[in-house]
Image (spheres, rainbow, N blue to C red):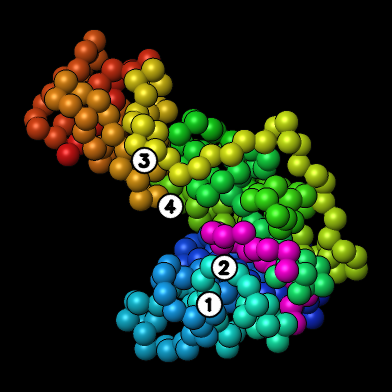
Amino acid sequence: MSNDASSNVREGISVAFFGRRCPFTAIPFEHLLRAGINVTALFLSSSSPIGDAVRRRRYRPSISIGGTSSSVERLAGEHDIPQYDIRRPLGGELHSILRQHQPDLLVAACFPWRIPASIREVALLGGINLHPSLLPRFRGPDPLFWTYRTGESEWGVTVHQLSDSFDAGAILGQTGFVIPDEMPGDQLERHAARLGGDLLLNVIAQGESQALRGRPQDQSEASYQTWPSPAELLVDRTWSAQRAINFIVGVRPLGYEPTIVTSRGLRVVHSARPANRETRLGETWFDEHTVDLPFADGIVEFTVE
């Protein structure tokens, strides 16, 4: 975390944090705690289809040690921050609990649902979201997948105001970076989260003496990508060899199963690397699970199911 970011933040500001049990929530959450931000409550999306709309969680260190508690829950527990599981729709019960915690600002990172205006207006400064792309490009639920699918070499994170449309609010801050070849997706997620944590602190510092003001997103530059279809998990043989390798190395740690078309049918890919054998013009199998395939500028060795 940068010293400049943390030193500009007033200790008295209060935040209610919204997220999921994932690194892109936990790492920025930790940044705020280390900077002395007063986080009054943590709200985590619940995947349960039944139960209370808002349920207070009781943190137990023994559970955390056993490995069944996420890192964001552990952090909140260690700092005595009230934490809640919430389900859709986000309505009156959440509104009432938020008012009890009196946050100045709502902060979201990796939170999967739209936070309505009736909830945002509880906080004096409204709400902001940390998004893992350089908006307005790559709006949507999983920009990191599309990083690799589109072969991007430059990426970034954006803090924007929450609005009635997903990922469309005014931009309050951005920072970009170059993605090294063959960077696993989970490492990219953590790197983006660390940069995002610093960016959040800088944006929060902007709101110390005045309301947060951003620049509107350019709708002509906007793009939205939803969850990938099976066709979008397929490696394109017109790509460069390096792009194909980057895609495999990138998306597998994100939980996806990329595929390739071979003479033996569609196969799920486990790993990819430059072929270290003599270059061949066509497909070459070495055993049931190893195949060399030509791409636009080279040969890639795949390990497949």
Residue highlighted by disc 4? 186
Q: Is residue 157 magenta?
A: no
Q: Nearer the viewer, residue 33 or 212?
A: 212
Residue placed furthest toward the right: 209
Residue for point 74% across, 78% down: 103
| Residue type, numbered disc 3 | Val
| Residue type, numbered disc 1 | Ala
Q: Position of residue 163 (x, y in %)?
A: 72, 55
The local crowd at label 2, few if under 14, some if 14 to 19, many if 20 or more residues have their Cα within 10 Å, is few
Residue for point 42% across, 28% down: 243
Q: CA distance from mark 4 to mark 2?
A: 30 Å
Q: Nearer the viewer, residue 259 or 75?
A: 259
Judge depth for marks 1 and 3 and give the one in front: 1
The numbered mark at residue 53 is 1
| Residue type, numbered disc 2 | Pro
Magenta residues span 101-118
Which is more N-terminal, label 3 or label 1?
Answer: 1
The N terminus - image quarter: bottom right
Q: Position of residue 165 (x, y in %)?
A: 68, 50
| Residue type, numbered disc 4 | Asp
Residue highlighted by disc 2? 89
Q: Height in image: 61 above or below 127? A: below
Q: CA distance from mark 1 to mark 2?
A: 8 Å
Q: Please identify the quarter of the rendering in which residue 14 is found.
A: bottom right
